[in-house]
Every structure is written in structure tokens, then in C-alpha cells.
Amino acid sequence: MSKQQTEVPYGTLDLLILKTLEAMGTMHGYAIARRIEQVWGAAMQLSQGSVYPALIRLQQEGWVRTDWGISETNRKVKFYSLTAAGRKQLRVEVANWEKATALVARFLEASS
Amino acid sequence: MTLRRGVGRLVALTCKRRLDRELEDEILAHLELAERDAVARGISPEEARRTARRSFGGIEQVKEEHRDDRSFRWIETLLRDFRHGLASVRRSPGFSAVVVGVLALGIGANVAMFSVVDAVLLKPLPFAEPDRMVGVWEAPRPGIVNATSAPDFLDWKRLATVFEALSAEQSISAALTGRGEPTRLSGKLVTADYFRVFATRTQLGRTFTPEEDRPGAAPVIVLSHAAWQNHFGGDADILQRRPVLDGEAHQVIGVLAPGAFDRDETRFWKPLIFTPDQRSLKVHWLTVYGRLRGGATLTQARERMQAIHAALTEDASSEDREAAIAIEPLARLLVGAGLQRSISVAFGAVAMVLLIACANVANLLLAKGATRRRELAVRAALGAGRCRLVGQLLTENLVLCLLGGMAGIAVADLLIRVAIPMLSESIPFTAAVTLDFRVLAFAGAIAVAVALLAGTLPAMQTAFGNLAESLNRSARGSSGAHSGMRRAIVIGEVALSLVLVSGALLLLRSLLKLQGLDTGVRVENVITMSVDLPIGAYRTPQQAALFYQAVAERLQTAPGIAQVGISTALPLQWIGNGEAMKVAGLEKLVRVRFKRVDPGYFRALGIPLLAGRGITSRDLHGAPRVVVINEALAARLADVAGLKDPVGKTVRVSCPGYVDRELFMPEVEIAGVIRNERVASPGYPDPPVVYVPLAQVPSPQVKLIVRTRAEAAAVMPAIREAVREIDSSLPLGDVATMEQVRERSLLGSSRPAWLIGTFAAIALLLTGIGLYGVVSHAVTQQRREIGIRMALGARASDVLSQVLWNALSMVAVGLAFGMLGAFGLTRVMKNLLFEISPLDPAALTVACVLMTLIGLLAGFLPAARAARVDPVTTLRDEG
């Protein structure tokens, strides 16, 4: 693993998935992984497969709902979408994230 | 983790297979889509597949992570091991049945015993705030407690502010008539505060008001729930009924809620109304219970009562001042030291049975483990960690132990159903012995404890032994350390069994000694029953005397009856009535037991006369008063008063009145001396007894004693008929043969003996199985060696004796340790034995011989098998 390519920070993947679903509406696992990869670019290393453990977690929390649908390759797949609770959770997590980054930024400024 | 997620993860446990399949499908779809996109970007199909896989990451890793995230991994593992355990139970049904059977015996006996311990010793009494309930007694001398007199009780009630409520009671019985066959109901006369002391709720109506124990109050009763159900058919209008007790109609004012009193013999409670005479007479006849005020301690109560007693007896005689007042917690009064000791010893014995069962199971598991080493070695070679293997083995053992526990609960349920009705007389009515939640929790706890105790060692041994070696060798030879441990376990079993067996034999010998004691009376073909005359119908002592005379004469002529006697107390059941004898020239009174008998009594029970004459039909009301004394009293009189030949001497004896307990102390002539009859349970010394003619001092409560010519029970209808002819409304109670009376008097000794004997028998059986298992396993392991020795010329008898010697050597070492254990338990056993030393050589020798026989038996079967080993086949099989 090269130094420039950082791993996804722990817990961030959940936020990214929630945000993606909010922006794009209902989509299947592959589309979610691709979307995150595209937005993220090459800056971070993400195994596409790691969205699935995250998705079952979010589903058990009740933030993400699944429905069966047909993929572009004519396969039965799960489509994921945000629930009302998920929307609320996303707002909470975004707020937390901004607070944390603001704090870190202030600390870095003050120390330089 | 949120609650919702936790639930989600638990749910995921149940649909593991579906979730795995769905994930599999999702991953396949994902790879297909990625491949399609790559091809669309102009990459060759082959390269596209590789790219898709690369950007997906490790497929197996994702699956693992998915499983970890969606559910509790350790539960999944546990469940898998559990299923594996159940499967292996099914695979080896014989082995499992033996283990479960052994555990069912051990756990079942323990659970049943625990339910008794819990009910009698651990649970609080089934009354509100039972800690505040106490019994209050007079203690005329230190260590002796006496019933209370009415004036004392009334003084205490007036002065003792330390009690919230104080009640006095006396047991009675009454004939319930007007509902078919007259029946006798046990009841209690109680002062109005009684139900405040026992804090009992009613299901119907109310309990007594303070006015209801005052003179002139209308006759009312409170019924127990059981009495309401059994004698009145649960009649919903019972409060409007007026049942007739002893010829008088009583208003039922309340029915108690179901509970502890339903296990007591008391069926009804009636207000105790003191007569003016009773209020002033110093006759000790009341049992007093109190409920302490909230916050008052036992010590405070004792100090206060002592102060009250000192103030009340300031100007009394010196003998009265010597006395004190004893206060004991109700719980301690209900569970005496003897019962507590018996229960503790029995519980200790049954715990030993469980240990032996554990040892057996551990042994079986070790043997089983030996046969599974190859399987485990393969799994270890494939990467399973040692801890994982131990965990799996332990879980499998747990499956067996839980099955054993469940079977044990069934065994315990059976034991409780069979044994508790027999034990109910020995345990207090407050103890409800049931398989309740606490007992089930105990069963679960010991099942898990047994799994750990019996399973850990074999699991470690199996999983940590040199597994690689077992892959290399084809199972041959013996496994040294392994069999050493199994031998050690069996030796422990033998030692524990010896302790139990010798304990049981000691109790049995003690019981035989007690049974062999002369009761001083004829026991064969004697039947007894009690008669309580209702005071309403028999108002004067003369009426009662005439009735007794009529009954005795009528019965004497009935067919099949040899002799009839009437008395106020049966032999072996103690004489509750204590009186005083005044001898001329002796300042101190002689304390005597007081028994009233009719002319037939001594003949009916075959009690021989030693001097003078017995009581005759001429000793009637108005005739000169006479008494007969027993040997013990004659000896006492000779000792304290120098009365060498008491016959013909005149003394004074205090006598209770017929109903009102008015005491009088007439002059009487000692007419004769009889040989001692056993007054209390065998093993207790006989007290001095004075026998007074029933006709001269009648009592409304007596026992009929009938010696029959043939089988006693067959004559019962004739006896009932004879009594009915004289008084048709009179029920006969407590029908028992004299043999039963004697058996009952030995219950305190026979019950522990049978209980421990049963446990010892189970222990012997288990130890036999354990020995057999180890010897038999050793023979199987050494088949090759035996084959070689026989090929080299060893005779069958040599092989036989070698195997037997192997078994006996284990027994011998076990016996040595067991002897040490038996010596250690001397102190515990001493209190339970009658005229037998806890180190009685006969009992210990028999126990050792018994264990050796078991050892021979357990060793003989495998030894015979070893002697039949055919060297040719053995060597060819394993060569």
C-alpha cells in the first residue's frame, strides 16, 4: 500500500454510504461502491466488497431499507434506500463530522 | 451497539443460511456488473474478470466480516458445537445413555434433597415479616421450658410493650356432626390476637375481633382453606352455615386463604375464653406466640420480659423466682437441632453421591476421549486451535450434562412425589417442598458445575495430549498417564463410597439396637385409637367415667377381642401431663408424669406387677384414692425420701380437674409398683410415672387400647359398632396398631438410616460401574499384550488373576483413603447413633468387605473376557 493511498478511516464508510443513498436515491451494492470510488477518486483505497458488511450493519440499525430488484445483468439483487431514521442519522453524523474537523482545524491553526 | 441492532443480530442467528445465500448472490451480481463495466471500457473479457475481482477485494474476507458484523459470532460457534454435541449423543446412544443415567441419579437425588433443604432451612417462614415471630415460654429452671399459665399470659399481655401482638393457644379436637359419619377435627383454642401474630389473610370473611375472646361471646370459628375444601366441599355460602362441633352450633366467620396452614393438622380456630377459675389458677397449659414490635430485637425482648418477670414474682416463693422467661424465634422452634442435623447429614451424603457420579462421568469421558484422539489430531493439523478444541469438547460435555440435568429433574420430581408424603410428619408444616424456580435454578447450576468438574480434565487431556503421536501410531499399547488418572479417579470413588456405606451401616446397626430394645409392653395384635368426649354432652366427670366403663364392658364381650384398656396416653408417645408428688418429711416436691388408666390397661399391654396390686374396678369415684407407680418412681422415692417399700404408703399427688383445670392435691395410697413401660421413644430414659384410676380422676380425652385374638385391623368394624351403640355421635380418631406406634417412635432414627442407606446403595452401584469401566478399558487396551503373554505360555488363570489383582489393588488403596474419611466424620455421626461407636469395628469391616466384593464383581467380567483372549486372532488383527 502506497503512502498516498490512505485506508478509509474507521466509521467513515457508513457516513459515505448514507450520504450516497441520500444523493442518489435507491441503488444496489455495486452502484454504491462505484459511486463512492468515483467521488473519492484514487486518494483512498476502498475494496468494493467492504460496502456489504457496512450495509448489513446499517440495515440492522434501521437506517437503510432493502427491496428486491433486477440488475442491469438481469439478476435479482438487493436495492438499498435511506429510511427516515437513516436521514436523521445522516444529519447527526454530518454535524458530528463537521464539529470534529472544525476542532482539529482550529487546533492545527493554533499550534502552527 | 443500539438495542435495535442487538435484536437484529440475534434475529440474524436464526436465518444464518438465508443470509449467507443472499450475500453470495449479491457478490456474484456485483462481480458480473463490474465485469460488464470493464468490458464496456474496452478491456478484454479475461482481463475484465481479473479487474472486477481485484477491485472487489478478498471475497472470503468480506464474507467473514459480514458474518461478524451481522450477528454474535461466539453464539454461532456455541450453537454449532451444541448441535455437534447433540449429533454425537445420537451417534453413540449407549455411551450417552450411561452418562445421562448416571447423572440423572446423582443430580436427581441432589435436587430432591435440595428442595427439602430449601423449604426447611433456607426459605423464610411463609408469614409476613417472620423474623418478628417468637415463641414465649416459662423456664422454671435453666434449660427446661414449660407451658404458660393463664394469669402469667394475661400479665405479659398487659405489661409487655415489646410485642405488637401476643397470643395464647391450646390444641383441641372436636366432633363434627350433622354431615354423615361424625368426624374428628383438630383445632385450636386461640386468643383473639392469634391471627395478628401469624399475619394470615382470609379468603372469605374475617378473623377474630378483640371482643370475641371475652366471656359471653357467641361461639364462632375460623376454618382453614383445606378444612373448607375437604369437610365442607368448598361451600360458597359457608359464612351462613352453622356447623355443629361437639354438639354446639358455631358461626363460621372466616376461611383462611390457601397456604401454610393447609399442611398443618389444625382445621379450625375458636376463641379461647378464659373462665374466672382459669384466670387465677397457676396451671401451665398454654402455648404462647408473639409478634415483636417493628425494630425490637430479640435481646431487648428478653431483657424486657425478664424485668416484667422479676417485678411480678417479687413476693413469690423462691422456686418461682428462680424461673425465667425464654424467647425463641419461631423459625428455630419449628426446625429443631435434630432435624437440622439429619437434613445436613443427608445433604452431605447426597453431595458425595454427586461427586461419585461426577467421577464416573469424568472416567467415561476420558475413555471416550481416548477413542477420539485421531479425529482431534486431524482437526488440529488442519488449523483448529487447542482452545477451540477444548471449547468444543466442553460444549459437548455440557450437552450431556444438561440432558442429565433434565432427566435428573424428572427423577427429583418422582422422588419428591414418593418421599415427601412419608417425610411430612418430620418436617414443619411451614415448609412447602416443591420443584419451584429456585430448585430448578439449582438443578441448572449443578448440571453446569458437573459439566465443568467432570468435563474439564478429560477435555484438556484429550485436546492437549500429544495429538501428533496419535496420528502416527496405530492405536496400540497402553496410554500411561491417561490410565493413571482414571485409576486415581476410581480410587477416589471407592473412598467416598466406603464413607457412605460405613455411615449407612452404622445408622442401620443403631436402628437395629433401638428396635431390639424392650418396649416394656406387648406390641402384637394391639390396636389403639383416641376418643374425645364433647364437654357439652359429658358435663361431669362421673358421666365420662360411666361412659368409659360402659365402652370397656361392651368391647370386652365383642367377638375377637381379648382385652380392653383405656388410658390418657399411649406408651412410647410421652406423657404430656406433668404433676407433683408430696411425700411426708420431704420439703421438695417430686416431679412425676401423670397418667390415668382404667383397670384393663396393665393387662391389655401385658405390663407386669412387681409389688402390691394393680388398679381394679373397685377403685371408683368415692372409693379410697389409690395410685400405682412405676419402677423409676419407686427408685426415685427410695433415693430422695428413703422410701424402701412404697406399697401401702400415703402421699399427696396434684391432679388436674376434669374440664376447668382446677388443681387439687388429694391424699392417695400407693397400691402397687409396675415394671417400667417405655414412656418416650426408645433410647430415652423412663421418667417416674404415677398411674391414677381413670374413674377417680376422669379426663375427656382418652386412648382406647384393644388387644385382639387375631389380626387387629379385622376387629376395627366391631370396635366402631360397639362404641356407636353407646354414643352414636362419637368419632374414633388416630387409629393405629401398637406396631405402628412403635415404628413411629423410631422415625427419628429410621428415616435417616433409610435415606443414607439408599444413597449408599446408589454410591455402591456407581462405584461398581466406574471400576468395571476402568478395568474393562484396560483389558481392551492390553489385548495385544495379553495375546503375546498367552502365546508365550501364560495360562488363562494367570491372566484372570492379574486383571482381578488390578481391580482389587485400586479397591485396597481406595479403602485406605475411605477409612481416613470415616475417621474424619466421627464427630458428625456421633450425635445420630444410639449405643454404637462411630468407629464400630463390625460396621467398618462389613463396609470394607462389601466394597471388596463389589471390586471382585466389577473386575471379574473383564477378567473373564481377558482370559478368553485368543492369541492368534489378537496378533493377526493388530499385527
Image (cartoon, grey):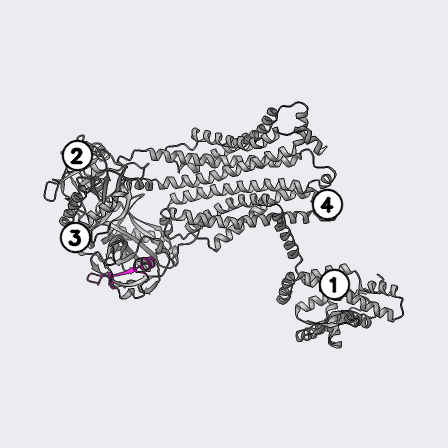
**Circle 1/circle 3 CB separation < 8 Å:** no
Residue A91 spot, x, y in % from top left = 70, 75
Residue A5 spot, x, y in % from top left = 83, 65
Looking at the rendering, the stretch of residues picked out in magenta corresponds to B211-233
Closest to the camera, between mark 3 and mark 4, is 4
Q: Earlier in the sequence, mark 1 or mark 4?
A: 1
What residue sits right under mark 4 in the picture? B378
What residue sits right under mark 3 in the picture? B538
Please tell me whether mark 4 sits on a helix, a strand or a loop. Answer: helix
User: Around disc 1, counting alpha carbons within 10 Å, would you say few (fewer than 14), some (14 to 19), or many (20 or more)?
Assistant: some
What residue sits right under mark 1 in the picture? B24
Residue with the most extreme top position: B793
Closest to the camera, between mark 3 and mark 2, is 3
Tag 3 subunit: B
Cα separation between marks 3 and 2: 31 Å
Q: Earlier in the sequence, mark 3 or mark 4?
A: 4
Q: Which sits in the foreground, B784 or B270? A: B784
Cα separation between marks 1 and 4: 29 Å
Please tell me whether mark 1 sits on a helix, a strand or a loop. Answer: helix
Q: Earlier in the sequence, mark 3 or mark 2?
A: 3
- What mark, if any, has residue B672 been given in the picture? 2
Task: Indicate whether A77 appears above or below B721.
Answer: below
Residue B842 spot, x, y in % from top left = 43, 29
Side (left or right) of B850 relative to B236: right
Determine the image quadrant of residue B456.
Answer: top right
Q: Amino acid at mark 3?
A: Tyr
Cα separation between marks 4 and 2: 93 Å
Q: Earlier in the sequence, mark 1 or mark 3?
A: 1
Task: Indicate whether B326 appears above or below B808.
Answer: below
Determine the image quadrant of residue B129.
Answer: bottom left
Q: Earlier in the sequence, mark 4 or mark 2?
A: 4
Q: Tell me, yes or no, whether the highlighted magenta stretch contains residue B390.
A: no
